[in-house]
Image (spheres, coloured by chain):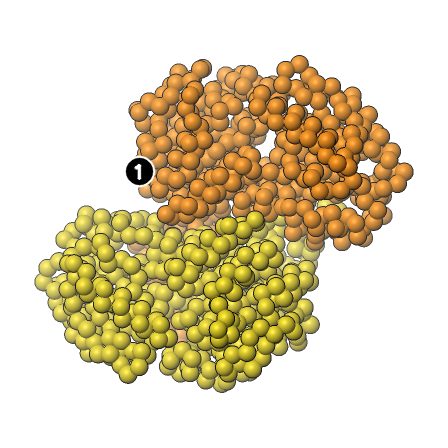
Chain colours: A yellow, B orange
Amino acid sequence: MTDPRSIIAGVEETHPDVATATTAAAEAFGGYRATDPQARGDFLDAVAAEIEADRETIAAAAVAESHLPAGRITGEIGRTTGQLRMFAEVVRRGDHLGVRIDPAQPAREPLPRADIRQRQVPLGPVAVFGASNFPLAFSTAGGDTASALAAGCPVVVKGHPAHPRTGHLVAQAITRAVEKAGLHPGTFSFLLAGPGEDGIALGQDLVTDPRIKAVGFTGSRGGGLALVAAAAARTEPIPVYAEMSSINPVVVLPGALGEDTTGLAQAYVGSLTLGSGQFCTNPGLLFLPRGESGDAFLTAAGEAVAAATGATMLTSGIATAYTSGAAALRDTAGVRVVGQGEAGEEDAPAPQVVEADALAGVTDEVFGASGVVVRYDDAAELADHLASLEGQLTATVHAADADADAAARLLPVLETKVGRILFNGWPTGVEVGHAMVHGGPFPATSDARGTSVGSLAIERFQRPVAYQDVPAGLLPAAVRDDNPWHLTRRIDGELQLP
Amino acid sequence: MTDPRSIIAGVEETHPDVATATTAAAEAFGGYRATDPQARGDFLDAVAAEIEADRETIAAAAVAESHLPAGRITGEIGRTTGQLRMFAEVVRRGDHLGVRIDPAQPAREPLPRADIRQRQVPLGPVAVFGASNFPLAFSTAGGDTASALAAGCPVVVKGHPAHPRTGHLVAQAITRAVEKAGLHPGTFSFLLAGPGEDGIALGQDLVTDPRIKAVGFTGSRGGGLALVAAAAARTEPIPVYAEMSSINPVVVLPGALGEDTTGLAQAYVGSLTLGSGQFCTNPGLLFLPRGESGDAFLTAAGEAVAAATGATMLTSGIATAYTSGAAALRDTAGVRVVGQGEAGEEDAPAPQVVEADALAGVTDEVFGASGVVVRYDDAAELADHLASLEGQLTATVHAADADADAAARLLPVLETKVGRILFNGWPTGVEVGHAMVHGGPFPATSDARGTSVGSLAIERFQRPVAYQDVPAGLLPAAVRDDNPWHLTRRIDGELQLP
């Protein structure tokens, strides 16, 4: 871990190169995966405590690097530590080990049955690529790192170039927790491309390193697909969990326009412009009934967005991409501007809402506060629109009681398209809990079988192993008859609580 | 389903083409996924009953087409129907739905918490490619089909060219169950390449059809990797569960040679030559201590295999491939023949055991009854051997009490290499149960996160969906407060039995 790679502005430490970090991770794997639930849970709690101990410095760095408001960053630190503590609880409970025991049946005819036991084991060292838009909760110690560490996998993070100092400080906090827990230093490593270094090549090197066994990524579709391709081209292909892009359709049903149309439109614009629209779950597409109520909604939305001012985006590059993407959208045939706000001071382009005659050409994500409204006449036209969409992270339905039948018909369609369905709310704001899904069919993610938020995320970094007639004294603790870890187990197919 | 594609010898019926079958599967999906646990379980039971009703005809076809003994085929029919009934039980119990509920906390500060519920939903139509070596249990109504149907996915099977009539008869049994259950006919389809048709192209067409959402495959490494590549190159990549190749290392520890060396050697050859060695779990590689006891084992193994006669293999092509693979192994530098049996009448090449000085050049699977023995001096040399192996389905350890320390050191190494570890037995014979894993790291399978045998197999064909603040009247039954399906649920992270 002493090989210097880069010294970047504001980060005085040196960082390892890829091979050094992955070699250390592979060395750490054997010991780390053998930690018992209590020790691993304590370590995750310690990571949270170390982040909290340095929270003021970390928050200052994150505000400076991300241009996000201090209150948002403070909340994100709480989310990050809360997430780590949730996984500590999950690990101590041990349900993720998925223990199954089919006891021997020596008298079975025509052949006796062997004793067979199963548990989940960690995949091995995991590479994590953090997001630009959540410098804490989806970054160095974010959900991918927390869930991989919880599963028993060492983690190598590629620090995001938009917030190197924040990443570095969080990495130091994790490293302190590793040291205090007496774990192998390779349990966690942090890589940074310095000025003049090629960060994309660094990421490719990391994903194609044979010691890496899985990848977590949050970012652009192009970036995610490049990692997916690199992982698939390896001699040994590995899973990539890339959370990539989504325009998060919102369906407004007719009845939902009946009560407070202006309030609904203002809430829509509030969600659209929150954090300059820099959320994976930003509501980029809204389906609105044709007719007077819909017109009133659109007028109110136009007024609300016209009154909004852009806030500085995460990076100049993101602001530039938004500006050109938003302009291209306005220039698309059949697209009309409903309302446009003011630009802010620096890298703070104007939010906008546009109306489009058709979906063609308007369904690529414009990362930022740009919303498209598409009108529909009836349930059949709406169903056609939804059926033509790609996979998404979320779908939102605004419905009154009178819309119940229409909503019931929508649900099974939405289930095939998205990872989270919500009613009468807004998709921005992803609760960290046990039931949350932040995932969805391609291209929202590269692997719809997982979620990157919530406790189910741990299962992405595991695989099952069966033990047949292994002598009692050699069995791993998780599958021993005396159940020393007090685990819930599936015995002959039936769950038994401890 | 009326578009004729092929009429092959012994199969009078017509079979649909790819697009007809996948279109029907997509149409069937909405209704089939909505079946409740009782109805879906009853359907799986009915498939088993329909197979049993035609068991004599099916068995005769399978014996004729596979050259496997009648007793083995009878057993395999029982295994196939038992597997279907196990999944019926699993579906009725409903634990695979993975229900999680985080109830709303309206009074939470600083923000109220929404009501969030999660369940697993089926991925969509699944393509299944059966194996040549299990014309029933790993084929048309085998584990992949049973687990995909159990998950709620329509299935399109590509019939194996080595047993078209067996596949056709089993497909008819499934189709009768579909009709009697009143399900959409697209719930199950069976494709066959006729004489002169290109079966490989048919398979590629199936995997690249956009309506197919996952693939199950058992077969060769080349075939599996081709499907993996085709699936990855789709506009929407999909999961491929390919069970491909394994040489299933067996480690004999010194103490295990102490008791009945000859008996152990004979049991080894018995497992090696069982069913002409045509098992995915055939013990193709055995590590043996150097020294006198090891020599005695080798002598006994040589005598046992010399006394064995080859039985007719599944196809002429498989027999030819075995013959050339076995010869190439004998011609490899540093390889000596320990014993060679007699060839049988037709397509029944001789079984063999060879000894190799090193692993280089002898670790490619030779499908059939060919075993390689590699000697070792001590634990360090053994550990080096094991560390150099690719991923495998199984690893077997033969150990006496005196070997406990050595065995304990081996276990964590084997866990990183295989899906199933067994002691003092033989890997051929895979129990169908809840704790079984028939899978393992690449290239044993293309996706180590699943198993193709056992009830965990159902999870391969699902993904999670979250429901946020969905009105009670619109919630799917699985996640309703009144729990009409009596499911085990995770409430705020804690499992609660029904």
Q: Residue furthest left?
A: A292
User: What residue sits 46% from the left and 54% below the top?
Assistant: A228
**Residue at x 36% of width, y 60% of height:** A245
Left or right of A391 on screen, residue A19: right
Q: Residue furthest front?
A: A196
The reply to whether residue B183 is visible in this rendering is no
Q: Nearer the viewer, residue B80 or A374?
A: A374
Q: Is residue B67 above or below residue B418?
A: above
Q: Is residue A236 left or right of residue A424?
A: right
Which quadrant does the N terminus of chain B fall into?
Answer: top left
Q: How many marks?
A: 1
Left or right, B104 with reference to A260: right
Q: Is residue B235 left or right of residue A456?
A: left
In this orientation, which residue lies closer to the viewer: B331 or A335?
B331
Q: Which residue is mark 1?
A: B27
Q: Which amino acid is tagged 1?
A: Glu
Does residue A382 show up? yes
Give the image quarter of residue B314: top right
Q: Could you say where residue B206 lies in the image, as x and y percent from the top left? A: 40, 35
A56 or A268, nearer to the observer: A56
Report x, y in % for residue B348: 66, 19
Q: Residue at x 24, y 79 (%)?
A: A343
Chain at numbered mark 1 = B
Q: Residue at x 63, y 46 (%)?
A: B391
x, y percent for residue B71 = 62, 20
Q: Residues within 10 Å of mark 1 (few under 14, many from 20)?
A: some
The percent position of residue B123, horizontal first and vertical second, equals 41, 45
Q: Secondary structure at mark 1?
A: helix
